[in-house]
Amino acid sequence: MTTYTISEINTILKGELIGNTTEKITGPEQLQSAKSNHISFIGSQKYLKYWADSKACAVVVNDNIKIEPSDNRAIIKVKNADLAMAKILELFNPPPPVFDTDIHPTTVIHDTAKIGSGCKIGPNCYVGKDVELGNNVILYPNVCVFDETIIGDNTVIWSGTVIRERCIIGSHCIFHTNVSIGADGFGYRPSDDGRGLVKIPQIGNVIIGHYVEIGANSCVDRAKFSSTIVGDGCKIDNLVQIAHNSIMGRSCIMAGHSGLAGSVTLGDGVIIGGSASIKDHTTIHSGATVGAGSGVVGDVEAGKTVLGYPAQDARDMLKQWVAMRQFMKKQ
Amino acid sequence: MTTYTISEINTILKGELIGNTTEKITGPEQLQSAKSNHISFIGSQKYLKYWADSKACAVVVNDNIKIEPSDNRAIIKVKNADLAMAKILELFNPPPPVFDTDIHPTTVIHDTAKIGSGCKIGPNCYVGKDVELGNNVILYPNVCVFDETIIGDNTVIWSGTVIRERCIIGSHCIFHTNVSIGADGFGYRPSDDGRGLVKIPQIGNVIIGHYVEIGANSCVDRAKFSSTIVGDGCKIDNLVQIAHNSIMGRSCIMAGHSGLAGSVTLGDGVIIGGSASIKDHTTIHSGATVGAGSGVVGDVEAGKTVLGYPAQDARDMLKQWVAMRQFMKKQ
Amino acid sequence: MTTYTISEINTILKGELIGNTTEKITGPEQLQSAKSNHISFIGSQKYLKYWADSKACAVVVNDNIKIEPSDNRAIIKVKNADLAMAKILELFNPPPPVFDTDIHPTTVIHDTAKIGSGCKIGPNCYVGKDVELGNNVILYPNVCVFDETIIGDNTVIWSGTVIRERCIIGSHCIFHTNVSIGADGFGYRPSDDGRGLVKIPQIGNVIIGHYVEIGANSCVDRAKFSSTIVGDGCKIDNLVQIAHNSIMGRSCIMAGHSGLAGSVTLGDGVIIGGSASIKDHTTIHSGATVGAGSGVVGDVEAGKTVLGYPAQDARDMLKQWVAMRQFMKKQ
């Protein structure tokens, strides 16, 4: 097990070390459940009360927090405890699950597929005709990648994920478990007798940029024609729906249960809160934020924050909610 | 690669061909990303501006749109550009992923299962005891079908989908990736000491009609007893929840993230918008529409459109939203 | 097929038997679709009308319902028809899908994994390094359990479910199809140049108690550090999102499409309605109820019921909704 001394950690964090501890630190833990070889964090005054009774031998705190070290327990003051925590998590990040063989004999790979160097493919995967995997791609057990799909270098695909045919996935991506990429978009037309629905073929694909992360059980549908596009650096949480022909710019964030209906356009750096939904054919311009639980029914200007259902300017919506409560109290 | 001339396409669309192009058309593409061998579409005046600079050699437009052909670029005018697009997508629909063997040797099929003629079953599937597959059923890799389930002719099941025991699936259905059919309904009773919850066995099944499409990562739970039923021609998007003992009529549409709580009844042709939820034991009568994001807490009359949370008549709800904004401006 | 006489069933229910039937009862069915060897239920006056035309040979009713037996058709009066139904479902619960072999030869189990006695593992599963399965654990086909994860006795995991490394799962749990346990929490920090997002390693795990049920396609993310915790007896429906570092007490209920953002704390016996969302870092104290479709943005007191978006006291919210409609009618 990797351990660090408090001064080794402080060297990395470039903080101010107050007090000392001789413990060999084995990892981070919350104040209440920490043991004596754990380091913990206090980012806000309200968690300060747990320090006295905690067994943690060290704590990283924001430099505006008033706190004293004690016997064999040290404090590291930093400008940003959250950033320091991220660095400590990188230090203690355990290795990923092992592969005993690079390409497991139970996996089925089509003769025509091209597999880059350093790839690891677990048991019971399927890699279809003319698929191209770059170098160092990891497919955990039970992943399916269909015909002619291309996956870039160093991308990691977790178990249960399915990537349909003719999609293009960038490098350094992470797709978590049970993700669905490239399923048919949801499109029908009335049948000729007007009494039913006929499927419109969805002949496009999905293009996903580099450094994209997609959460467990999320879905990105293939385009009706042309492409559904997720830009470089986008981060998508669990159970998110991205419908056909939507286009996301760079470094957008979509939180859990949020969704884009068809042909939505997001600029760069757009943030979509949890459970928020965006109507089809709308545009959310760069730097805009959609609050959790909102329903957006029209275009949103760059940099604006919207909230509510139907979504409007967040400050107006908050005022409206307050006014409603006031008004009701008078009834 | 299949190509068509502009006059071959016009023959199929039965439109009015204006101008001409000698290009061999390889497929549809959006105006802005089209190359010279692509055909594109203009369904609304607002996209007309992209025509001049597009490289597309042809465009299909609604006949009320004013547009001129140019050098080696043709126009086809039609009554309904969306319908024409659907026909063109059918023309250029590429073949589905290949199967090198009809039934892959890595798949596990119980001795008692009956497999119709023309079935294709990919690697690493599981087909349980007494399962019956009709003719021409396709199971892509990593599909599981449990004991005594029956699947009709020409139904296609994509990877990661699981169909539990004793379900009945119609013909010509499409289930996309990671769908869950027949998981236990969500039912508990208080334990005898009143301090916990005891599972109520869910001994019913799921019955799904013909020509039903179910989107990626959607769920249809088995009934407590009797059946959860999805009628012929229903189209269900991604991440949709259909709880135990719900009954859907014919040709209903449920958009992404929508859900039916237990024992909901939908008539025929009901449309449920994205992220809308329907309370348990309610009935939405035929032809009714539930707006996106709505929460329905009571029965909805045939043909009515409801909106909001709690959902009410859509016109009333829209008026209420407008009035609220007016009222707030005066505060 | 198991059958029971009406008096055998009445002995179990300890009800009042009125009239008699000589039918051998094969199972429960709804009044409208029942055949002559079915028993049915009437819990409320409004379903009484279906009795006369039903072919069911017997019906279990709440003792306040006025109903007469008829020729070879019996009635059992009980205090609680729902509870009686649960007991009857237990009587007729069919056996689960068969395993022809205890551990299927196509499944891949790491040499170091410890498998308890009586375990059954279906085809095409993956069990990683140092995994420990207790006694009588069932893994249906296509389940993946990653390195160092521990699963307690008698737990059942359905197909398509993935449990990531270093998680701890209790005994007597049921995880339905396509569940994702232990995917990375959703955490990023701004890149040093401020123009992108850098992944924060998620080095914690998931701890799930005993008698927990998790619905199809639901997700429980691993903690950033420390653990995401689901307490004993919690019941989680389909398509539910539980984000990193959330902590649930005992016997909580989360209905379909509901979600906990990061670091949410639930007390014991909390009920979260369908599609409800809880903001990160909030606490819902024991015995509180969150209505369906609500968005909770602040702590909720023990025993309180909240509703709406943003959620407030349910009675206040209901009054507000009524008042709004009244107000609008006057406009």
Image: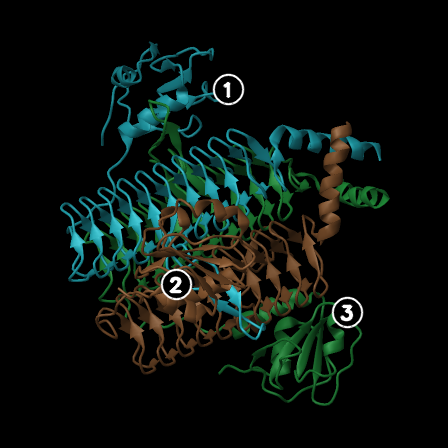
Chain colours: A cyan, B brown, C green
Query: Around disc 2, counting alpha carbons within 10 Å, would you say few (fewer than 14), some (14 to 19), or many (20 or more)?
Result: many
Image check: B110 left or right of A2? right
The residue to which callout 1 is attached is A49
Q: Give the chain letter at badge 3.
A: C
Residue closest to the eye, C220 or B5: B5
User: Which circle, 3 or 1, is nearer the viewer?
Assistant: 3
Look at label 2 and name its amino acid: Thr
Distance of label 2 from label 1 (alpha carbons): 49 Å
Q: Residue at x 64, y 71 (%)?
A: C13
Q: Residue at x 42, y 71 (%)?
A: B11
Distance of label 3 from label 1 (alpha carbons): 57 Å
Look at label 3 and name its amino acid: Gln
Residue C327, above or below B139: above
Instruction: Name the spot of residue A127 as percent of width and height, x first.
Output: 23, 58
Residue C301, above or below B200: above
Residue C262, above or below A128: above
Instruction: Name the spot of residue C66 as percent of width and height, x first.
Output: 80, 74
- Would you say residue A257 is visible in this rendering? no
User: Which circle, 2 or 1, is nearer the viewer?
Assistant: 2
Residue C183 occupies quadrant = top left
| Secondary structure of residue under mark 1 | helix
Instruction: Name the spot of residue B290 as percent of width and height, x first.
Output: 64, 56
User: Which circle, 2 or 3, is nearer the viewer?
Assistant: 2
| Secondary structure of residue under mark 2 | loop
Look at label 1 and name its amino acid: Lys
The residue to which callout 2 is attached is B161
The residue to which callout 3 is attached is C45
Residue B298 occupies quadrant = bottom right
- Would you say residue B119 is visible in this rendering? yes
Indicate which disc residue C251 carries. none
On the same chain, marks 2 and 1? The answer is no
**Where's the C terminus of chain B, which quadrant?**
top right
